[in-house]
Image (cartoon, rainbow, N blue to C red):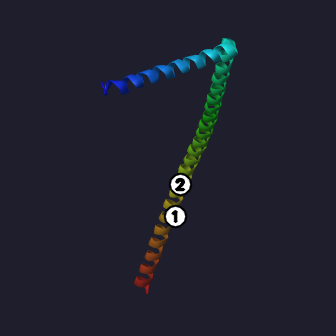
Amino acid sequence: MDIKKPIVDRVNNFNMEQTSLLVIVTTLVTALGIKEIWSIVKKRMDIKAQKDERNDEFSIKVIEELKNKIDALEHKIDALIKENTELHKQVAKMEERLLQNARKKSARTQNRKSNG
């Protein structure tokens, strides 16, 4: 018998809480009216939707800006690759000239030794 009493008390308290909640909701509905409650709920939903829309618009703007920056960087990379290729060509030409000059100098030095 002692074990059942706390359980019964809890159930009674729960039923009282539910009844109190039901009375509060009923009182609000009758006092404000269904239209007023619906307008409050609708306003909250609209505010949340506007907030989500603003966040979506902001995200879209950020994504577009990042895409533009990526495109600009890709063009810059292409330009740098072309410039690097041209510089490699110029270095190769300079190396070739240096080798030719070194051969000519070496040939002249050998000619002087053989003539001298």
Q: Nearer the viewer, residue 76 or 2?
A: 2
Query: What secondary structure is marked by label 1?
Result: helix
User: CB atoms at circles 1 and 2 under 8 Å apart?
Assistant: no
Tell me: 19 left or right of 34: left
Q: Which residue is at 52% across, 52% downward? A: 85
Within 10 angstroms of label 1, few (less than 14), some, or many (20 or more) residues?
Answer: few
Count the marks: 2
Q: For residue 41, which quarter of the picture?
A: top right
Residue matched to label 2: 84
Q: Amino acid at mark 1?
A: Met
Q: Nearer the viewer, residue 113 or 12?
A: 12
* Mark 1 vs mark 2, CA separation in Å: 15 Å
**Screen quadrant of the C terminus:** bottom left
Residue 102 percent across, percent down from the top left: 46, 72
User: Which is nearer the N-term, disc 1 or disc 2?
Assistant: 2
Against 73, residue 41 (above or below) is above
Q: Amino acid at mark 2?
A: Asn
